[in-house]
Structures are given as structure tokens and as C-alpha cells.
């Protein structure tokens, strides 16, 4: 790796803005440790980040053989530990991952030593050391390529966005959406928006919410109004997570009792489409006086659905209504109209998956690495094991996610005969590695990856993606 002669070691803390209505506060800050963590996670492929950040590193002198070796080791590190937040809504899947906790820890750390102490014990000691060593190694690159060139913009941006948020009275708008969602938020806890810079005037920005922290990657010169629309989009996600439990349960019931075969996919996209319609549509219009004529979201499913439900959302907010069964019925109808046949499109149905595997044969981190590398959009995935357990097969059959069984011998394939009886219709004699596919009566895609081991998992995923779309009838494809 290229060495630099000067390194900024001071912890930088920027002015805080707090807008209050009752006890609501929205604070704007920046933190070098968090920016470094997001940068390293991005260039190592450990999570979604700004592709522009990745390109800046890849085009630099820092991207040498030693750096690539370290990134490969980091990509193999298991950061997939998580725990599930229980909910009355069975399929909400409100889980917290270790990598999310690292974001919150990074936001509040004054330096890497502090970050190391805050996160110690969340990973096995050797893995934790490897992560911290990687952050130290790439710190020089981050400072020279990203942090130091952005200081003038970053300081001015934090000052300007503070003033702009005050003018826009974001708290009042937040309260309107909170009422729509029947959200239960502790207003004594502030929202903290941490802005990390991208020293380019064009490219890909990004924001993700973790707890009460919004980690936001911003382009140099990105206009304040667009930044605040993104912030509002992420605040809507937080309100969705914190909805009244009874309403959460009712929303899920309204979706899953629908007769439409598109109900599962519509439900899975609901949170993102609503956040986009509200943040990038309704709030954007409030800020600019008109709707954005460009895309509101980077995936076509969310973008089109959000635009198509905008009038429904606007009417609900104007009339101070709450989400109800009629609104959900209209949402499903819009989805079915917008995306006929989309439940069979590979990139769409791989966005939410449940894997059934033999004991210890499907490492979540290995699946995550492949999916983050090849999928444009990943909402959720989880694993269930072992295949031989009737209880686990029942759990699999209840999932509204795409159901993927990973097997590596004929006995395991036979064990799926009750779960996937359609397998008996297919001839797999003489085949070494192959994919099986089917669409259930409830509109859920069911797949079998018959592979020698997880080393073939990426090849199976690429083969599936190459199909673009599958048949609704049982089918078999060689890998």
C-alpha cells in the first residue's frame, strides 16, 4: 500500500443541530471513525455502500497487492451474527446484525482505540482483531482519498444543512408520518444523522438507518434539499420498525389474506416503497414545490411502485388518516398491475430468501458475500437447519420468502420429498450439479441447489441469475 507522510489523528466533532417539537430532536454530525468503517466495509464487499467510494479506492495507488490480500481476508470474516427482535407480525424480520451495532459504535467513537473497546466481545477475539487491524491498515487510504479532501465541503455542508432543516420544519412533517404509521417512538431519544463525505460531484450516495443513527454518504456539492429528502426517507423506515404492534399485525394480516398471488412480493416491498413515496415523493414535493421527474429509487420495482402509490399516500397524509385494509388492498392491486409476472424474475425473488440446509453446511457469511457481490438489491435472507428435521421443514414451508434448499447428495434430496413433492416430476438421473425450481400455489418460488459443496454456491447463483426468469412449472437446469 502507498504510504503517506501526514495523517490527521484528531477526532473531529462538528456542530450539532437540534430541531425540536415537543421532545423530537434531529441532530447532524460527522465522525471520521464511522466514515472509515463504512469505507472499509464497502471496498471489502462486506455490505452495500456507495459504488463511487469503491471506485475511488480501486483507481488509487493504495489498491496494491497487499491491500487486495487484506481485503480478501476481510471478505471472509464472519460479520453475519444477528438476533431477532420479536414482533406480533411474523414476517417483519426486524433483526439486528453485528455490523449494524458497529455502525452505532463507530458513530460514537472518538478514535479506533475507542471503537475497538466499544465493540470488543461482539466477535470472537481473533475476528475482532482482524477487523480492527484492517481498519488501521486502510485508515491512511481513507484519510488521503476521502476525509482530508472533503473537509471544506463537510464543514460547510453540516452548517448549511442545519439551517435548511430549521427552515423546513422537519419535525412537523415527521409528526404527520408518525401518525400515519401509528409509530411508537421515544421522543426523548434524538435522531442522529452522521454525514460521511464522497469527494466527487457525481456518483452514488447512500444512507442506512441503524437504531437512532442514520449513516449517510454524501457527494461533494449534493444539494441540501436532496440530502434532507434522503434523511426523511430513512426516518420513515425507523417509524415503520416502531409501528404500534397491533397495527403491524393487522397490516400483515391484510396482505396475506389477499387472494392475489402477488401478495407476498407486495408485502416484502411495502416498507421500501412507502419510504420512497413519502421521502422522495411527498417530502421532496414539500421542499421543491414539485415532484422529482427523475427516478426516486435505484431499483425499478421500488421506483415504479412508489410513484404509482404516491397519490394514495398524499391523500392519507392530507386527511390525517392511518394505514388500513383498503390502503393495503390498493397497494397490492398497484403492484400486480405494475409488475405482471415479476414474481418469476430472478433478481426480484432473490431479494428475500430463506435457506434450508444440512447442519453447518450453509454459512450465512458465505451466502452474504455472494449475494452482496451479484445482487443489485437484497432485503433479507436467513438460514434454517437441518434438512432432516420435520419441524424445520415446516418452518421453511411457512416462509413467504423464496425457499431455497441446498443439498449435496441424493439422500438429502429425498428428504425434501414431503416439503417439495413436485421434485418427483423431474428427472435428474446422471446429473452432477443442478437447479430445481417451482412456483407454489401461494406464489412463493421454491428452489433446490444440488451442489457438491458451498464452493459451488456462487456458480449456482450466477446460473440462476443468467436465466433472468423461471417458469411457474417445475423445472431443472444444469449448473
Image (tube, rainbow, N blue to C red):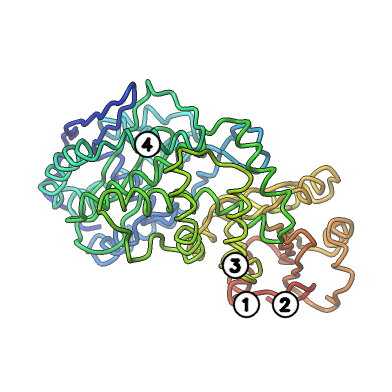
Q: Give the quadrant of the C terminus.
A: bottom right
SS for callout 1:
helix
Q: Is residue 103 above or below residue 63?
A: above
> Residue 429: where, in percent of width, then height?
86, 77
Front disc: 2 or 1? 1
The residue carrying mark 2 is 477
For image coordinates 34% across by 21% down, the residue present is 23
Q: Which comes sooner in the sequence, label 2 or label 3? A: 3
Cα separation, mark 4 vs mark 1, equals 43 Å
The residue carrying mark 3 is 337
SS for callout 2:
strand
Q: Which comes sooner in the sequence, label 3 or label 4? A: 4
For image coordinates 39% across by 44% down, the residue present is 234
Q: Residues within 10 Å of mark 2 (few under 14, many from 20)?
A: some
Front-most of residues 312 and 456: 312
Cα separation, mark 4 vs mark 2, equals 49 Å
> Residue 235: where, in percent of width, then height?
39, 40
> Residue 456: where, in percent of width, then height?
64, 67
> Residue 412: where, in percent of width, then height?
83, 58
Q: Residues within 10 Å of mark 1 (few under 14, many from 20)?
A: few
C-beta proximity under 8 Å, tags 4 and 1: no
The residue carrying mark 4 is 174
Q: Is residue 152 left or right of residue 365?
A: left
Cα separation, mark 2 vs mark 3, equals 30 Å
Cα separation, mark 1 vs mark 3, equals 23 Å
C-beta proximity under 8 Å, tags 2 and 3: no
Amino acid at each position: 500500500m502507498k504510504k503517506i507522510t501526514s495523517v490527521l489523528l484528531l477526532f473531529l466533532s462538528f456542530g450539532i443541530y437540534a430541531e425540536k417539537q415537543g421532545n423530537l430532536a434531529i441532530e447532524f454530525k460527522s465522525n471520521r471513525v464511522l466514515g472509515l468503517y463504512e469505507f472499509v466495509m464497502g471496498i471489502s464487499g462486506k455490505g452495500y455502500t456507495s459504488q463511487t467510494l469503491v471506485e475511488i479506492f480501486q483507481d488509487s495507488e493504495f489498491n496494491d497487492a497487499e491491500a487486495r490480500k487484506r481485503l480478501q481476508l476481510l471478505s471472509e470474516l464472519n460479520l453475519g451474527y444477528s438476533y431477532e427482535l420479536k414482533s406480533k407480525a411474523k414476517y417483519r424480520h426486524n433483526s439486528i446484525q453485528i455490523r449494524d451495532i458497529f455502525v452505532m459504535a463507530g458513530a460514537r467513537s472518538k478514535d479506533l482505540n475507542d471503537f475497538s473497546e466499544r465493540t470488543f466481545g461482539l466477535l470472537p477475539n481473533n475476528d475482532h482483531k482482524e477487523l480492527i487491524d484492517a481498519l488501521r491498515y486502510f485508515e491512511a487510504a481513507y484519510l488521503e482519498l476521502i476525509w482530508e479532501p472533503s473537509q471544506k465541503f463537510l464543514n460547510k455542508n453540516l452548517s448549511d444543512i442545519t439551517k435548511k432543516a430549521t427552515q423546513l420544519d422537519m419535525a412537523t412533517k415527521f409528526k404527520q408520518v408518525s401518525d400515519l404509521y401509528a409509530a411508537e417512538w421515544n421522543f426523548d431519544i434524538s435522531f442522529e444523522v452522521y454525514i460521511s463525505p464522497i469527494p466527487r460531484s457525481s456518483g452514488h450516495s447512500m444512507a442506512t438507518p441503524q437504531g437512532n443513527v442514520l449513516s449517510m454518504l454524501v457527494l461533494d456539492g449534493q444539494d441540501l434539499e436532496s440530502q434532507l429528502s434522503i434523511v426523511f426517507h430513512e426516518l420513515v423506515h425507523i417509524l415503520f420498525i416502531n409501528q404500534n404492534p397491533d397495527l403491524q399485525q393487522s397490516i400483515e394480516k391484510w396482505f396475506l389474506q389477499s387472494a392475489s398471488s402477488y401478495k407476498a412480493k407486495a408485502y416484502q416491498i411495502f416498507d421500501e416503497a412507502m419510504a420512497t413515496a413519502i421521502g422522495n415523493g411527498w417530502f421532496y414535493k414539500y421542499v421543491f414545490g414539485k415532484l422529482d421527474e427523475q427516478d426516486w429509487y435505484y431499483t425499478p420495482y421500488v421506483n415504479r411502485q412508489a410513484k404509482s402509490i404516491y397519490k394514495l399516500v398524499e391523500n392519507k397524509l392530507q386527511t390525517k388518516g392511518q394505514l388500513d385494509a383498503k390502503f393495503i388492498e390498493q397497494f397490492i392491486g398497484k403492484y400486480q398491475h405494475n409488475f405482471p409476472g415479476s414474481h418469476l424474475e430472478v433478481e426480484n425473488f432473490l431479494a428475500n430468501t430463506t435457506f434450508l440446509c444440512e447442519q453447518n453446511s450453509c454459512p450465512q457469511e458465505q451466502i452474504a458475500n455472494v449475494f452482496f457481490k451479484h445482487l443489485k438489491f437484497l432485503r433479507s435472507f436467513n438460514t434454517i437447519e437441518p434438512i432432516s428435521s420435520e419441524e424445520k421443514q415446516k418452518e421453511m414451508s411457512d416462509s413467504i420468502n423464496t425457499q431455497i434448499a441446498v443439498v449435496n447428495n441424493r439422500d438429502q434430496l429425498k428428504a425434501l420429498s414431503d416439503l417439495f413433492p413436485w421434485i418427483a416430476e423431474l428427472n435428474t438421473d446422471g446429473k452432477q450439479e443442478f437447479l430445481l425450481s417451482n412456483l407454489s400455489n401461494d406464489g412463493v418460488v421454491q428452489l433446490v441447489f444440488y451442489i457438491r459443496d458451498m464452493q459451488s454456491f456462487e456458480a449456482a447463483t450466477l446460473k440462476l441469475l443468467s436465466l433472468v426468469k423461471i417458469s411457474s412449472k417445475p423445472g431443472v437446469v444444469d449448473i
